[in-house]
Amino acid sequence: MLASAGEFTMTRQEIMKIDQEHGEYARRRVDYWQQLIRSGNQYSDLEKLRLANDFFNELEFINDAEHWGKEDYWATPLQTLVSNGGDCEDFSIAKYFTLLEMGISPERMRLTYVKALRLNQAHMVLTYFPTPDAEPLVLDNLDAEIRPANKRSDLLPVYSFNVSGLWLAKSRSSESKHVGKSTRLSPWRDVIARINSEFTR
């Protein structure tokens, strides 16, 4: 299970292979991602959030059926980058692992399933907790501005998870109930396995 920084470092040879297999623009995206990861200790947590959020929000939104030929598929950060697109799950997962690599503690972040009330559909965002009891900040591809969850009345939280646990939302606030391990979620187990296979040397 990925839980610490240093998992996504790529060699120059591996990056050039991206160029050969997916083209120059894919290689440039991966190059910038690697620079972002390496520069993590230069920034405050809030600056890290903004950099990762802005970077992945620039990618094209593509639904899973069109992109992967599947109804629901959680892509790895590398898959999202080389294909230049993804959906809300893909962007949130990519932000989560990028920020983990940039030095943010996994305990401060959760992937959060919400109902997007204006769209009347399920949606995923990344939430960041400045302190354990603080109102989380929301990183979202629908709204580029990072704001506290209590300022996002358009989102209704359902459940959240990270590498260490799974929580059910008890209200609109940061209050939630721990209900077990995130490995209960099969798409999460699957994407972790694929990330591990991509970066096993």
Image (cartoon, rainbow, N blue to C red):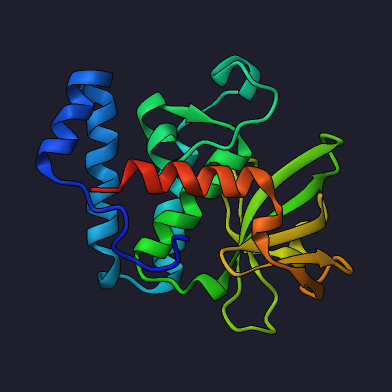
Front position in the image: 11 or 127: 11
Q: Is 63 left, or right, of 44 in this rendering? A: right
Q: Is 186 left, or right, of 156 in this rendering? A: left
Q: For residue 173, say whether it is visible.
A: yes
Q: For residue 63, say whether it is visible.
A: no
Q: Quadrant of residue 16?
A: top left
Residue 116 placed where, x, y %?
Answer: 80, 43
Q: Is 181 left, or right, of 102 in this rendering? A: right
Reply above or below: 39 against 92: below
Residue 59 placed where, x, y %?
Answer: 45, 32
Q: Residue furthest left?
A: 13
Residue occupying image coordinates x 27% and y 72%: 41
Reply above or below: 192 against 86: below
Residue occupying image coordinates x 69% and y 84%: 133
Q: Quadrant of residue 72?
A: top right
Reply above or below: 137 against 15: below
Residue 179 placed where, x, y %?
Answer: 80, 69
Q: Is 117 left, or right, of 80 in this rendering? A: right
